[in-house]
Image (spheres, rainbow, N blue to C red):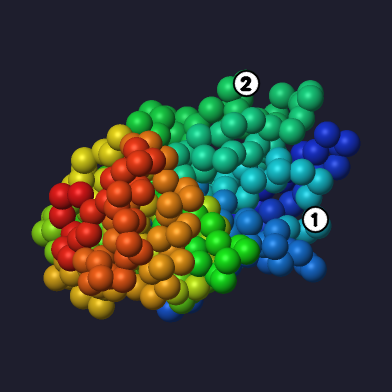
Amino acid sequence: MSAPQTAECHCLFSDGSTLRVTATRRAREGRADVKCSVRAQPELAERMQQVVRLARHTETRSDSRDQVVLSMDRAPRDRGWELAAVLADRMVRGQLPARALVANGWSDEWHLGRLAGHTLKTAPAHVLLGGPDGLPHLGVLTGQPDAAGAVSSARTWFPLHSGGRHDSMDWVEVSVYPADGAEEEGSVTVPELDLAGQDAVRRVLAGARHFDGGRRSWRTTVRFGQPRFQGNSFELALVLADRIARGREFLPRGRILASGASSAWHAGRVEAVEGIAAKCALLLLEAAPGDRVLLPRACEAQLPAGFGDRLRERGASLASVERIGII
């Protein structure tokens, strides 16, 4: 299927008004894979970029040589525009035949290719609606089965230490989908982080996967509960979520709570992180029965007295690790 240079898809809203999503394609040449623009609405443009990147996760084939630029001709009234953006992106890349389409649909599981619903009470017959009463999953568009069953996901938690008041636990979720011959590092999508954050995640996963010697290729999507954070202490939690999603670790009874980093993930090494005392205090507050806490062995001497005993009193367990492997 040849890919056009430009594609459009319209979204119909409940008041009868429409919005036009325009997608154009050009050689990537080192630029971002997706660029989005909405006049005076940078947060909306960021959300559109996230939606499109997530929706690509379960495509039957992937080609990252082109950049796609998407825009809206006006601000939307609700989330119904999401399906129109996904369709425009697929048409301009030749994933779907380019044709006139009007759609309305949204999802919180774009990375699974599933649609939750639409925002219209009634709609003309020509409008493509997302959800159980319309398009339940994106595979229907090309006669493919629901790909969600082939996606394996795992979520782990890591402590965010910012000085006390705003300390909290953040989660990182890794979703993997089998890919044939995909370039390992280039097939990792981190839709919510800036370029530096995306590069950091890809570098960590490439190194950790090198250590376990796996030859299978995966299309990988990484999401964070709170994507605005600093530092590298999330790395161990990221690596563990990735290993669980790919079947390299067993599933814990509860959650995995971890903090650790490394300058040599390709060697499987887990190194110390800063602020371990404050992070331990937060872990004690958050740990629940069945949880497993993993911290670098290099930080063992800095753990508060009785930390492991207090975790066990809460029904959680503690492991000090110096190499990734069985947890």
| Mark before the other along the chain sequence, 1 or 2 | 1
Instruction: State the residue in front, 246 or 187.
Output: 246
Query: x, y percentage for residue 118?
Result: 69, 32
Q: Residues within 10 Å of mark 1 (few under 14, many from 20)?
A: some
Q: Is residue 116 above or below residue 209?
A: above
Q: Is residue 3 left or right of residue 253?
A: right
Mark 1: which secondary structure?
Answer: loop
Q: Is residue 80 left or right of residue 31?
A: right
Q: Residue furthest right?
A: 15
Q: Residue furthest front?
A: 305
> Quadrant location of residue 227?
bottom right
The residue singled out by tag 1 in the image is 75
Residue found 38% across the figure and 28% down from its top: 145
Mark 2: which secondary structure?
Answer: loop
Q: Is residue 18 left or right of residue 26?
A: right
Cα separation, mark 1 vs mark 2, equals 26 Å
Instruction: Residue type at mark 1: give it.
Output: Ala
Residue found 47% across the figure and 57% down from its top: 282
The image shows a total of numbered marks equal to: 2
Query: x, y percentage for residue 81?
Result: 70, 45
Q: Residues within 10 Å of mark 2 (few under 14, many from 20)?
A: few
Instruction: State the residue in front, 307 or 216.
Output: 307
The residue singled out by tag 2 in the image is 133
> Quadrant location of residue 305?
bottom left
Instruction: Residue type at mark 2: give it.
Output: Asp
Residue found 54% across the figure and 28% down from its top: 136
Residue found 59% across the figure and 39% down from its top: 107
Instruction: State the residue in front, 159 or 189.
Output: 159
Instruction: State the residue in front, 44 or 208.
Output: 208
